[in-house]
Image (cartoon, rainbow, N blue to C red):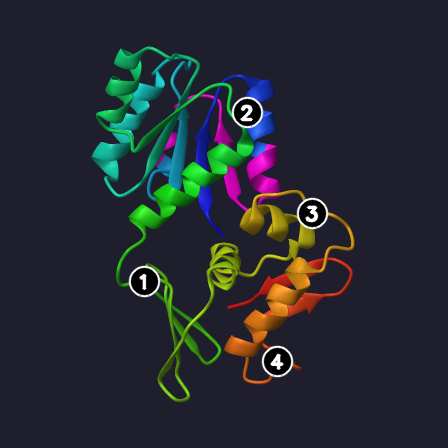
Amino acid sequence: MIRILYIEDEKEIGQWVSKELTERGYDVTWLESGEGLEQHINSKDLAILDVMLPGLDGFSIGKRIKRENKDLPILMLSARTAVEDKIEGLHFADDYLTKPFHPDELVARLEVLLRRYQKSDDVLTLQHLKIYTKDMQIINTIDEEEILLTGKQFYLLQYFIRHLNQILTKEQLYEGVWGESYIEGDKTLMVHIRYLREKIEINPAKPMIIETIRGIGYRVKQ
């Protein structure tokens, strides 16, 4: 599960963003200031910082984070629209998003940052699969052949990998991969999962990688 450090002092916005990200499968630690920051810098996968904060502002906190952990991607959030503010933020941060924003845009930017910072030697083993997570190359270790996926199959498996061991609802999967609200009765997701299983499972009729959680959705366990 992707671990996010989120620092925002406005309770209404903080609750909204935390809820949106949690529902999409992220593990969110929400702080209302930079107090206690040190214990999180090296245990998170990404940081989201509001600019206007009590005590140290987001710019100061972001610079401190980068001094301690240069490989932690940072996304700045701010109601400020002045070019000078954006330039200051981008001196150390990796992206800058102006309030108000749609949660889909926030998640899209987070996914881009996570892909950019993913280490090239990251290798994930799932059953008989060896997955090189930076470029999503998939090797079947039984015959050492590469498994090629279509675009949607690729994004679907990538979404599962970003949320390993977590039960994902049909709504989460559809919104996360297709970027649209799930309509009850739509067979699109089910069809794509069936085709994906045919490529990655030893026995698609008895899947060991993509587990069906009856009445809820699916899960990929490591």
Do labels 1 and 4 touch, CB within 8 Å?
A: no
N-term mark: 1 or 3: 1
Q: Which residue is mark 1?
A: 122
CB under 8 Å between discs 4 and 3: no
For residue 204, the mark is 4
Q: CA distance from mark 1 to mark 3?
A: 32 Å
Kind of residue indicated by mark 3? Tyr
Question: CA gap, disc 2 to disc 1?
Answer: 32 Å
Q: Nearer the viewer, mark 1 or mark 4?
A: 4
* Mark 3 to mark 2 CA distance (whole Å): 25 Å
Q: Residue at x 29, y 13 (%)?
A: 83
* Magenta span includes 4: no
Q: Amino acid at mark 2?
A: Gly
Residue 139 seen by the camera: yes
Question: What amino acid is found at the position of numbered circle 1 in the picture?
Answer: Asp
**Residue at image coords 60%, 46%:** 175
- The magenta stretch is 19-38
Task: Look at discs 1 and 3 and give the one toward the viewer.
Answer: 3
Which residue is nearer to you in this view: 114 or 29?
Answer: 114
Residue 37 placement (x, y as % from top left): 37, 30
| Residue at 30%, 47% in the rendered image | 117
Q: Which residue is mark 2?
A: 14
Q: Which mark is residue 182?
A: 3
Label 1 crowding class (10 Å Cα cut-off): few <14, some 14-19, many 20+? Answer: few
**Which callout, 3 or 2, points at the residue further toward the start of the chain?**
2
In primary-sequence order, the first of circles 4 and 3 is 3
